Amino acid sequence: MENKKSSFSSSLGFVLAAAGSAVGLGNIWRFPYLAAKDGGGLFLLIYILVAVSFGFTMIVTEVAIGRRTKRSPAYAYGDIHPKFKWVGKLATIVPFLIFPYYCVIGGWVLKYAVTFMTGKAELSAQDDFFTGFITGQYEPIIYGAIFIIVTTLVVIFGVNNGIERVSKYIMPALAVMVIGIAVFSLTIKKDGVSSLDGLGVYLIPNLEGKGIGDIFGVIMDAVGQLFYSVSVAMGILVTYGSYLRDEDNLVSAVNQIEIFDTLVAFFAGLMIIPTVYVFMGPEGMTSGPGLMFIALPKIFLSMGSVFCYLIGVLFFLMVLFAALTSSVALMEAVVASLMEMFNISRKKATYIELGLGLAMAVVVCLGYNVFYFELELPNHVVGQILDLVDYITNNIMMPVVALATCLLIGWVKGTGYIIDEATKTGSKFNRKYLYIFMIRYVSPVLLLILLLMAFGILKF
């Protein structure tokens, strides 16, 4: 079958595709928001430590599982141990559920990109623009459908001609835009306030008013952010790992993914936090999810020059690229499993997922009007289908998949299963002992705490 025969043409192709799956909306808006909320440099320091320990552990594990089994997520875990077949099924359901609502959000980004590119950016700065758009019955569906169709066009061409080729163009362009906008943001001044003041907020740890419980809460925020940032526990890295050639250096590739993803998140913070600080002050940096769709358009327009108007266009194009590479990875994880489960061609599997994704995306869009409801969950009150599905997948299902993966490798199969695969090309595993300690002891504890927090049993 195609998903067994296909492989990335080079280690670089794998790195760019896997990094593309990791670099998404979570890096662009969620990371800066958490950094501002959790003490700036304090969160940044803790996140880096979590990334090189917990993040590295989970990425290496999933990529190695994929390459060693050469199977889709649906079957990879069962190949390792029959009693863990359910983990593979759950890891397949996760991207299936996330893909439609992620594409809906991708449609929102597309709407803003089009608005800026057509010279109508003033509309995006109106207070009711975002709410008016997402609560509309038709426009969000159209933009979401366009985003899904573009994603499908990439996936249907396969690993080499679709995913790898697009990643090789988009990822360098995305990196250049992120760095360029970040550098520009450090030159902004208004009413005697400099973006360099905001840079200090971002980089310097702030422990004021933070006790041990608060610091532990920051740690758990960083762990939770890793799920958004590195695409673990959703079948993606197992899928991409199955396409990684046996002769490629797995550890080196994972290190590059880790560095690329962390740098993009860092520069996203550098791009957003100092700018928001100048125009909205410290309180503006805690505006959460509304930051990208409500606060930033106003900021871009308040800059006043044509060049700064161009910055708004580049920003939403950058976010659009990031969203696209992630949606491609989500769809590919589902398509790979469908191909293997039903022994069908890539084209047929892709069309099936396209149809299901479109139908579910319509339901998500209607969740802001026709199907609106209010439901109190352990962590917050939600009023949309999108929030509910996001809570179920990101707060419950993904930690369960990751926890089961740790138990499978750390205690049932043994860490040698992963270490042997990671070092079979003769490469060194410099963090081998850290890896063993993390997957056997630390990671399971952190994941269990995340689950307890998701159910409201623990609070920080």
Image (cartoon, rainbow, N blue to C red):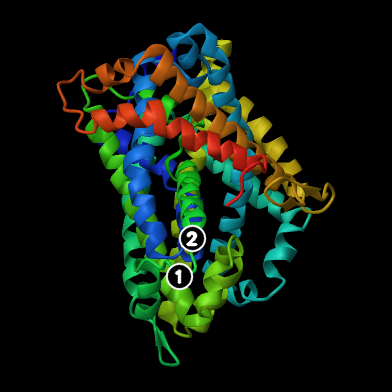
The circle on residue 38 is none
Q: How many marks?
A: 2
Q: Is residue 152 visible?
A: no
Residue found 72% across the figure and 71% down from its top: 128
The crowding category of the residue bearing disc 2, from other C-alpha atoms within 10 Å (few below 14, some 14 to 19, many at least 20), is few
Could you tell me the amino acid type at mark 2? Answer: Gly
On screen, residue 115 versus residue 156, left or right, reads right
Residue found 55% across the figure and 68% down from its top: 286
On screen, residue 31 versus residue 67, left or right, reads right
For the residue pair 5 and 423, the one nearer the viewer reads as 423
Residue found 26% across the figure and 23% down from its top: 422
Q: Secondary structure at mark 2?
A: loop
The circle on residue 211 is 2
Image quadrant occupied by the N terminus = top left
For the residue pair 424 and 441, the one nearer the viewer reads as 441
Vertical position of residue 51 compared to residue 93: above or below: below
From the top left corner, tell me how far across and down residue 224 is, in percent: 50, 45
For the residue pair 58 and 269, the one nearer the viewer reads as 58
Measure the C-alpha gap from mark 1 to mark 2. 9 Å
From the top left corner, tell me how far across and down residue 382 is, in percent: 74, 51
The circle on residue 208 is 1
Residue with the most extreme top position: 82
Vertical position of residue 447 compared to residue 263: above or below: above
Q: Quadrant of residue 238?
A: top left
On screen, residue 111 versus residue 299, left or right, reads right
Could you tell me the amino acid type at mark 1? Answer: Glu
The crowding category of the residue bearing disc 1, from other C-alpha atoms within 10 Å (few below 14, some 14 to 19, many at least 20), is few
Residue found 32% across the figure and 66% down from its top: 180
From the top left corner, tell me how far across and down residue 77 is, in percent: 47, 16
Q: Secondary structure at mark 1?
A: loop
Q: Quadrant of residue 18?
A: top left
